[in-house]
Image (cartoon, helix red, strand yellow):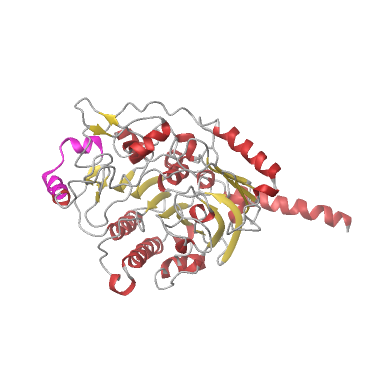
Amino acid sequence: MLLKTLLYPILLIALANGYSEELTGSRPNIVFILSDDMGWAQPGFNGGDKDLTPNLDQLASEGMKLTQFYSHSVCAPTRGAFLTGRYAFRTWMDWRSEDFGKPSYLEKVGLTLAINDRGVPTRRIHALDTNERTVAEALKETGYFTALIGKWHCGEWLKEHLPMQQGFMHQYGHYAWGIDYNNYTIPHNAPARFAVYDWHRNERPLEENGYTTDLIGAEAARVIGQQSQDKPFFLYVPFNAVHGPINEVPRYAEQYGARNAALKIFDEAVGRILSAIDRNGFEDNTLIVFANDNGGLTEESNHPYRGTKNTTFEGGVRVPCIVKWPGHARPQTLNNGMMFIADFFSTFVTLAGGSLEQEHPLDSHDMTEMLFASDPSPRTEIVYEVTGSVRIPTIRQGDYKLMGDRLFNIINDPHETTDIAADNPWIVNTLQARLAEVGKERPPLGDKPLLMDPPLPYIYGLDENKKPPQWLVDRVEKVRATQPKEWAPGETPWPQAPKTP
């Protein structure tokens, strides 16, 4: 009996190790779908209206739902962390490119609004450093076809900051943040106040008509249909849905209202991608991940969690995530392991048989065993923000999360109703010391001398803007003609930097 007791855990370890070896280098196709600003409670599988998300709900029933999956609390930081496997503060991606044209944000890093040599205010260039190794580059090294279809938000001006210089062999969609779904312009170009066109295929201006959500879904389906069984592919499909501005929605608005209609159209686009995977014979060997970039805009959309996008309460950082991989991710199961969006870097590269050896150290953990062998999560800590961000320094370690001076036990109190800092000074001090230690690893920002010129381009992308086609100029001028020409003193079309309490 004693021998059996001793041998049983050894057998389990051997089985787990064998499973790990089986999956390492198994080279599945990978389709990573990212929604934008979707709240935890919006999809039907998390309690939302099932009429709005039947395809997501079907995916959830066929896959595994992660209950403690986390992102950063706003768009660009999450994208930077996913692409690099590193916390956003390490690459200064906790600051968005557009923030460097906004005086209230610049003030927080000791900079002022830039003025070009003609005396015109303009933006300082900020983006994901091209020297960072992205997950697309790592997968491309192993022979994967790589494509970005949707929203980039990691740099929109210099060529070296665009997707095809960061490992993607195909690009479609927009470079910057909240694009208009119907005319493909960014409504403001801080500090300029007027629209800029932002729709591209393979880093060239693209003239199209249609609703961006539909177009992104169609392009992803088209690209999947071009793939073969002989070469694995990685599709990163970050939609702009359901990010604002949500104005004219092509269908369902009368029945559901504009915002819910936008969600239903997003779900239809996801269904189109899933159908393309099945129709082209890739279902059995395709790892599909659906996640969201940060919490929703209202606490209601994030129910039962407290907080919203741009906060580090659970409602801002705990987001829906589904993993489907036939034969490996158990259908209709919940996985309670702690996971951060950067962890997909190491997980994907491991599955592809690639190398995790690189110049910049990773914050990513390989989650292969947690996701596919029911092992505990190797992650015990998440650093959401450190000093130098516009948001509150925040860390999760084990059961506890420190937000500034507030402490919560996330396991006992996931809704963050009770601040227990006063009763746990030792935990507070320990986590504050850890945050200070990690914060020292932030690299210098520099003075950001490169400027966007012209300050108000017709299209994003320096090279693309040099000789924009006439159709593009006409489209942009038509939109600009409808925009306000004057603003009250101190008012801007973009939000001001959040004030730290």
Q: Is residue 411 magenta?
A: no
Which of these two is toward me, 277 or 482? 482
User: Of all residues shown, which one is farthest toward the right?
Assistant: 2
Report whether residue 127 is seen.
no
Q: Percent x, y for residue 181?
A: 27, 56
Question: In the image, 334: left or right of 14?
Answer: left
Q: Residue at x 19, y 50 (%)?
A: 484
Question: In the image, 306: left or right of 472?
Answer: right
Question: In the image, 211: left or right of 33?
Answer: left
| Marker count (numbered) | 0
Which of these two is toward me, 423 or 276? 423
User: Of all residues shown, which one is farthest toward the front?
Assistant: 489
Q: Quadrant of residue 156?
A: top left
Q: Percent x, y for residue 440?
A: 55, 30
Magenta highlight: main SS:
helix
Q: Write the start and end of the magenta stretch as one range.
A: 461-477
Q: Percent x, y for residue 474?
A: 12, 48
Q: Is residue 201 above or below residue 124?
A: below
Q: Is residue 470 magenta?
A: yes
Q: Is residue 325 above or below residue 140?
A: below
Q: Residue at x 34, y 42 (%)?
A: 169
Report whether residue 16 is seen.
yes
Q: Quadrant of residue 219?
A: bottom left
Q: Quadrant of the N terminus?
A: bottom right
Which of these two is toward me, 245 or 266? 245
Question: In the image, 98: left or right of 466?
Answer: right
Q: Residue at x 81, y 53 (%)?
A: 7
